[in-house]
Image (tube, grey):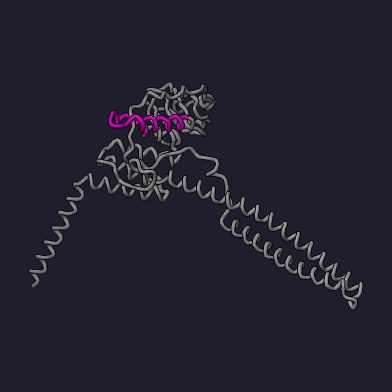
Amino acid sequence: MAKLFLSAMLAFWLVLGFAGRAHAADPEREARERYDNAVKLYEEGAYDAALVELNRAAELRPSYKLYYNIGQVRYAMHDYAAAIDAYRRYLDQGGDKIPSSRREQVQKELNELAQRVAKLTIDIDVPGAEILIDDAPVGTSPLAGPLIVNSGIRLVTVRHPDYLPQTRRITLAGNVQDKVSFTLVGHGAPAGQEAASANATTSTSPMAPVSSSGPPPFAVEGSLGSKSSPQADATRHHPSSTAVWVGWATTGALAVGATVTGVVTLSKNSKLADDRGRLEVSDAQIEDQASHVRTLAIVTDVLTAGAVVAGGVSLWLTLDHLSGKKASAASASARSFRVGVAPRGVRLETSF
């Protein structure tokens, strides 16, 4: 019996081992799983993790379609320079497989992204120096051409084993060409010489417009979603549903109060008219009733006016709240994975 049990366990573990090797040997299957994980992570806002999954999927099963996904994630991470690089790889590798309509769409996105990046030329008097931007390596001197970097405040660091490292903080506006020069100083140089070399020489000029005829065609069959430029309505604060309900509740309370006091006023006024013709009712009683009726009439008018004003405010709050929900829904659909020509939702159509 023990031998039978051991034989069964051995067979079980052998089956698991072959299954595991079969799974590991199937890069297409793992790539699809990585892509599905990227979809979930993207929807949860874990963009850095989604980027790792997409890069791994591209390593397992290279596909030009994945570069559009990577560009969308980079855009969500506000790394516009990397988004441009991914989009251009998509277009370059897709070539004639991509329809012209998609090419135009991506070109439009590239033109929008060009307003959020700058071209930076870095001149260094020593070859072989490592160049870092915001602590990320970007190449060694001399560079083949200007770098595409995100606009804003950037840290440019130059390192060489035979020279002192230098770091510059530069401010880059969008859609401009900047230039920064470094003169490296060897170890043991005087402090004054080191300080003098730390003064950057920069120049700025507008970037040349992006050509609309440059990239090859475009087709999105594995996209994370279509990117749209941020709209003011999406960032403006809209009233909450609580404020809307409070507004309508106040309107209803004022309307009910106006109705009740109006009915009471009519009843009191009718009684006053009857008492005016009765001899047993004194003039003082008539005057007291008339004063009461006037007070009720004023209260009714005030409550009615308040109900009208509150109703107008509540209507404005409602319309503004609905527009806010519409803007949020549009923003959410723009962030969701959209594959193929589907307007929203998640479907895996990427062919590996």
Q: Is residue 103 magenta?
A: yes
Is residue 48 at all visible to an observer of this figure?
A: no
Q: State the residue at coordinates (17%, 54%).
A: 19
Q: State the residue at coordinates (59%, 56%).
A: 244
Q: Is residue 98 magenta?
A: yes
Q: Quadrant of residue 56?
A: top left
Most extreme residue toward the front, as rendered? 277
Most extreme residue toward the right, as rendered? 283
Horizontal side of 15 relative to 79 (left or right) equals: left
**Residue 349 position in % (x across, y down):** 29, 43
Q: In which quarter of the image is the N terminus?
A: bottom left
Is residue 77 at all visible to an observer of this figure?
A: yes
Q: Which of 267 and 136 is in front in this view?
A: 267
**Residue 13 position in % (x across, y down):** 15, 60
Q: In which quarter of the image is residue 28?
A: top left
Horizontal side of 24 relative to 39 (left or right) equals: left
Horizontal side of 40 relative to 174 (left or right) equals: left
Numbered disc total: 0
**Residue 188 position in % (x across, y down):** 46, 28
Q: Quadrant of the C terminus?
A: top left
| Image vertical order of residue 17 relative to residue 331, above or below | below
Q: Nearer the viewer, residue 97 or 308?
A: 308
| Image vertical order of residue 281 relative to residue 118, above or below | below
Q: State the residue at coordinates (48%, 37%).
A: 229
| Image vertical order of residue 10 relative to residue 138, above or below | below
Horizontal side of 302 relative to 229 (left or right) equals: right
- Name the main secondary structure of what is drawn in magenta: helix
The range drawn in magenta is 87-114
Q: Which of 75 and 123 is in front in this view?
A: 75
**Residue 124 position in % (x across, y down):** 43, 23
Q: Which of 45 and 268 is in front in this view?
A: 268
